[in-house]
Image (cartoon, rainbow, N blue to C red):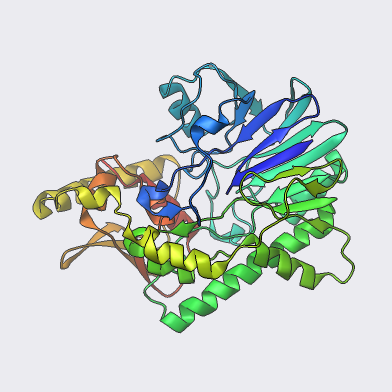
Amino acid sequence: MKVKFISNACCIVETNTGTQILTDPWINDGVFEGSWCHFHKLKTTIKDLQNIDAIYVSHIHPDHYDDRFFNFPKDIPIIVLDHGFNFLHRKLLDGGYKNLIKIKDKETMKFKDLELTLFAPFVKHNFFEDNTKIGNLIDSAIVFQSDNQSIFNANDNKPSNDACRELKSLFGNFDLVMMNYNNAGPYPSCFNNLMEEEKHIEHNNNLLRNIDFLHSNLKILMPKYFLPFAGSYVIGGKNHFKNQYLGTTTWDKCIEILKNKEKAQQIKYVALREQDIFDLDTGTSNKEYIPIDEYEVENYIKNVLAKIKYPYEKDSMPNIEKLIKDLVLSSSKMSERLNRIKLIPDMDVFIKVKDKSINVLSAENPKGKIECSLDLRLLKRILDRKSHWNNAEIGCHIDFNRSPNYFSLDIHTALQFLHL
């Protein structure tokens, strides 16, 4: 097989007979309420990705399914995980895409000369399993098998060590593993209870924790080749200053850290740039790899991406009295929704509106307090269901102040239900 890399989690997997499956096509800047961008301007367009046999969409987050520019023939086969939380299915069907190939967790299905196996979320959370009752609801991973070769694409669905042992028992040693090496999200960049020095410390801790965990998985899987994959982005617009604190790094640095952990390099590490093609038969790329120039990336962010305006910045400011009424009503509706899924909050949550701090969630025995601040135009969009809290949070549009600095994954899940 061959893998043509585009960006982030987007690539084309091709068999020797020419069957091509496109994965997670995010091409245009501005997902997650306008802030997520590629670290260089892509040459590839959606029009360049039309000559394919099927699309695999791992989950509904917009860096994997960008519904703004998801423009393909309506009858194209779209491979999706078949599970109980079909947010993605509804979006695709609403968009006129009827040819959904639904594959259940751990089920294998033939597609032309490929065998495809999908996996539901392996764990609720790899680092905070004990802190959540709900956890990950939407991610998936896929194994491609053809030409007596196998590729494991984890996307954002990072397997646990136990899951890696199960994968190895099912498939043996993969020829290629593509796994996430970053920690996309608002921590620590958006947490104002941390001083600047603490944010830098937490940034480094996040990076090392993620790559240490990745390394432990690779030691179990022992693939022939490893390609750092997914979670590659920078923040544009007025929040671009938060890039320095993100829990992310380049795939070049990821590979450098991994190599420093191993004296004997049994796994071959692969780095690809946009439109580079890696051939599993030969173990080579069709182009000489050009390392990422971080100085060039910083200049691009400062001189180009920083000037981006978010969609909500074009809105007029909402009426404060009505916004507070809508927020209180949304809070009540959120509590009803949480009762239905049996999610019990363990922190008190407040949202700032001008000089007021509105209590939107109360815990019976709180482990702490968290206060949220965001542009009131974006808050109005969220309450009106024109935007989504989770996208705003991942896009670094919401600032948090929590006391103590305790992470409750369920609280961040709960706030996704805040809307009218």
Which of 365/238 is in front?
238
> What is the x, y in percent for residue 45?
50, 37
With respect to residue 316, does 263 lie above or below?
below
> In the rendered view of the protein, which quadrant contains the N terminus?
top right
Residue 365, given in percent of the width and then of the height, sits at: 40, 65
In the picture shown, does residue 124 fall above or below 128?
Answer: above
In the foreground, 192 or 304: 304
Tell me where residue 125 appears, x and y as whole percent: 60, 55
Question: Does residue 273 appear left or right of residue 373 in this picture?
Answer: right
Give the residue drawn at x 56%, y 26%: 50
Q: Position of residue 68 (x, y in %)?
A: 40, 35
Seen at 57% across and 54% down, the residue is 231
State whether residue 119 appears in this view. Answer: no
The quadrant holding residue 355 is: bottom left
What residue is drawn where x is 88% and y is 33%? 148
Q: Is residue 324 above or below residue 49?
A: below
Tell me if residue 376 can be seen: yes
Q: Image point 74% across, 43% down: which residue?
A: 152
Q: Quadrant of the C terminus?
A: top left
Q: Is 361 left or right of 51, judged from the image as shown?
A: left
